Image: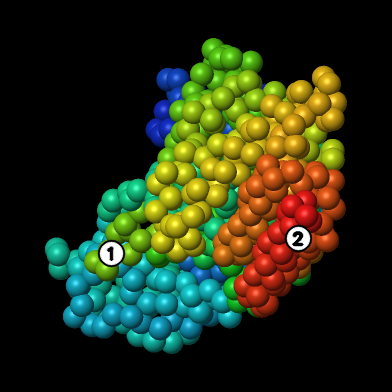
Amino acid sequence: MMMNQGRIVKVSGPLVVAENMRDSNMLDVVHVSDMKLIGEILEIHEDRASIQVYEETSGLGPGEPVVSTKAPLSVELGPGLIENIFDGIQRPLQEMREASGNNITRGIKINALNREKKWRFVPTVKSGDNVSGGDIIGTVQENEVFEHRILVPIGIEGTIESIQEGDFTIEETVAMLKDKKGSIKALTMLQKWPVRKERPYKEKLSPTEPLITGQRIIDTLFPIASGGVAAIPGPFGSGKTVVQHQLAKWAEADLVVYIGCGERGNEMTDVLMEFPALKDPKTGHPLMKRTVLIANTSDMPVAAREASIYTGITIAEYFRDMGYTVALMADSTSRWAEALREMSGRLEEMPGEEGYPAYLSSRLAQFYERAGKVKTLGSDDRVGAISAIGAVSPPGGDISEPVSQATLRIVKVFWGLDYNLSYKRHFPAINWLQSYSLYQDKLADWYKENVSRDWTTYRADMMRILQEEAELQEIVQLVGIDALSPADRVTLEAARSIREDYLQQNAFNEQDTYTTLIKQYRMLRIILSFYEKSHDAVNKGVEINDLFSMPVRERISRMKYISDDEGSKPFDEIEEELSNQVQTLIGEKDR
């Protein structure tokens, strides 16, 4: 119900101050001016409210009306979310384009979800069943790939009086429920939820399974747990967005929520052009069939950036509550923090480090805390998970700045991007000496049971070789490679093989863009076998140059292009060939 009309007394960019707002509440959504621009109350002093407006405020002036809706900023949840593209406050961009052309018209009001489309509702409960908030009462096949589970709204419990199968719009009644007080409630497929309020769950679980991404440097060296949180800081041009695109395409999640928060429009265009054309490896259908996109690019209103992160995580929580695994990509939290800084400055708050508000860390923590693996509400003990991966764009690549440091205190995985690696065309450009994963120990048992008992040993050997290489490179730069012992040169050659044949991946090659864990293990075993056998050979006097020019070296460098369909046979052949050629060299030396 609309009421409580105030009027504008000050306009400062996205900040509008209105008086006569005494009856309003913090975080209420308001309609500003006769154009009914959408805003949100940030502060109230006596009868004056400071409002951040999510649309362009040019042309507004004192005296124009401000009307409170008496409700917080909320998102609509229900069938129709999948395959859709929303702006930061969940307005569907395709429908907005059809209504107003290529440029977004101010004050345009369009429902986030289609009110006319009918969905086939199939009940999973019957009359007389007791249900409570979070229980699944039916399903809707949203597309060929995704089953949308219809939940009882949180806070409602009782007995199903009637429920029917059929075609319904999201606002039509699909079931009648009698609560404990005896009153009858109509249940529809549409729910609303305030974006700044975390959706409740029964219990948060410890993450014990990895989110498999098919990216070798991530899965092997710096894994993220399903339900974990990770940050990708890196300077401009080091491939943050490329890594997030790869994770969105290949991560083993039921659903992807991609938030383009304040990044350049052309990067978001890449996503919008690529995803419908990409085939999902699990289903064979376009990747968009299990994706929700939120686009709030750098040329869109700055205040809506701040809301877009919350809009995205709330949609992710809704699908988590159905029992799905969700991969959430936020690109980038730095632009979101800049929006916070701008609003904080206009509110004349005391600035913290580098002008960011003092509450930057707590806001970041509130966002990342909403990720995790949980036991959802409802009687069937479903488990859902949100894995949050946030890109950070520090100015000049300096991760000592406040957003990077606040993020690193919260997340458990740090994939540090290196401009020098990207300059050498080494992608993903994740620096293996700076990055880390704190999930490593928790996931070790899973890798041992599901891949190989040798996995953690091989990973440790690989990291040791890469660290030894970094130390040896310093000596090489001082006195040249000829000053090294044959054993050290073997270490350098093995490290080069790890870097070029294993860690480097080609996103445009069908076989190399995604690597299964079992293939990763086979590749790793061969590279480490080369390292050990070469050490053994040089100890027996074999010449370094003979070892490095073995014909099998070419096959090792190309094993990343072996198809999964070929199984273990090609890898077994390479391993056998390696043993035979090393033995031949040792035999020739003995003669």
* Residue annotated with mark 1: 381
Measuring from the top left, give residue 41's x and y in whole percent: 50, 33
**Relative to 553, does residue 342 appear above or below in the rendering?**
above
Mark 1 vs mark 2, CA separation in Å: 60 Å
Please tell me whether mark 1 or mark 2 is closer to you in this view: 2
Q: Is residue 286 left or right of residue 344?
A: right
Residue depicted at 56% across the width and 69% down the height: 80
- Residue at 43% across / 87% down in the picture? 166
Q: Quadrant of residue 421?
A: top right
Task: Tell me where residue 261 appears, x and y as whole percent.
Answer: 66, 43
Count of all numbered marks drawn on residues in the image: 2
Q: Nearer the viewer, residue 15 or 120?
A: 120
Instruction: From this view, report whether residue 467 is shown above or below residue 581.
Output: above
For badge 2, the amino acid type reads Thr
Q: Residue at x 63, y 54 (%)?
A: 529
Q: Nearer the viewer, residue 76 or 504?
A: 504
Residue neighbourhood size for the residue with mark 2, other residues' Cα within 10 Å, grouped as few (<14), some (14–19), many (≥20):
few
User: What residue do we see at 27% from left, 53% from top?
Assistant: 202
Quick one: SS at disc 2? helix
Res. 309 image quadrant? top right
Quick check: 2 left or right of 159?
Answer: right
Q: With respect to residue 17, does 72 lie above or below?
A: below
Asked if residue 20 can be seen in this view, the reply is no
Q: Amino acid at mark 1?
A: Asp
Residue 493 x/y as whole percent: 76, 43
Direction top: furthest residue: 350
For residue 584, which numbered disc appears in the image?
2
In this view, which residue lies farthest toward the front?
A: 591
